[in-house]
Image (cartoon, rainbow, N blue to C red):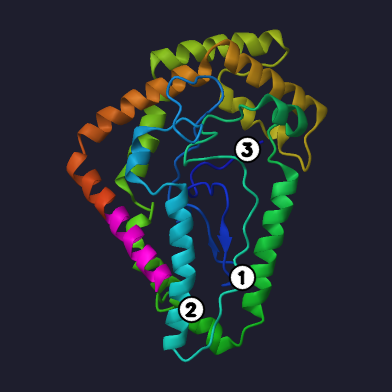
Amino acid sequence: MKTDRTLGLTALGAAIVLGAAGYLITGGEEGGKNIRQVESAADTSHISGDGHWKLPAEAYLPNKEQRKLIAHARGIAIEQCMKGKGFSYRAPSSIPLPDDGTGNLTDGRYGIHDRAKAARFGYHPDPELQVQRAKAMDASSKSFKASPEPERRALMGSTSSMNDGCVQEAKQKFAGTSAQNSRAVKIANEAYDQAKADVRVKRVFAGWAACMHNQGFSYSEPMQANDDVKFATRTPTEQEIKAAVADVDCRVRNDVNKVWYETEKDYQNRLISRSSDELEMTRRRVAHSVSEARSLIKG
């Protein structure tokens, strides 16, 4: 099933929805390019404390707990801004979305890896999680639409081209944690493409493709199976599930995840070494925004 990996950082674990025209404040979403999610199934030699692989660029981006903290603080900042404009606005109660079990910005980066989930959902996301998230967004949208027009303008801005709304003001207040145009995100995306073209990764791709061929599937690399338009159906087909299970098995058999991860990590380290000053400034901006968020929450 085709997945878009360039629209925004994937929301991880619990997320918070605030009722502002469906304005979703998630663990890490800011628009802009995303860090494609990273694999966590095959190797354990570089496991982080939360049980998932991490890539070097993540050191310069807010972690899961920091993203949740910022989301909470943004809600408070929106309420304070609205009060300053004469509205006794209360952000709707935060709606925690179901935790998908991921622990950092890069889980699932190379596609599916959980054989049990592949056997149930193929390349599709868990439908229960999708339904719950859709309900949360619907509640947020209805809350916004029920607000008087002046309140909506104060919240979202006087026009679509103006950034004078409280949502935008709150976003700017914690701009240090924005992934949009972040050098760390650019490094991650560049390293992903470089690793994919590396001979080490191409070698395991060839082994994976041969393995898939033996199972009756013709793909030259793993993400071709993941993005096959035949699987863009409302629910997973029997053929999709067979392909997804074979995909996971062939990944493990050929160490695809381990080699891809290690290769990309090498490229990220090289790119990071060339941007150390800029990345250190990024790290400091993140730390400042997190400190500001804690102060705002404490009151």
Give the farthest residue toward the front: 298
Q: Is residue 180 above or below residue 120?
A: below
Give the residue displayed 38% in from the left and 21% down from the top.
263
Indicate the position of residue 71 as horizontal and vertical percent values: 48, 61
Q: Which residues are magenta?
A: 285-299
Labelled disc at residue 93 = 1
Q: Looking at the figure, which quarter contains the C terminus?
A: bottom left
Is residue 107 rendered magenta in the image? Answer: no
Give the residue displayed 53% in from the left and 11% down from the top.
206
Name the N-terminal-most of marks 1 and 3. Answer: 3
Q: Quadrant of residue 262?
A: top left
Q: Secondary structure at mark 1?
A: loop
160 or 16: nearer the viewer: 16
Give the residue displayed 52% in from the left and 14% down from the top.
255
Question: How busy is the neighbourhood of tag 2: few (under 14 within 10 Å), some, or many (20 plus)?
Answer: many
Residue type of the residue flagged with mark 2: Glu
Residue type of the residue flagged with mark 3: Lys
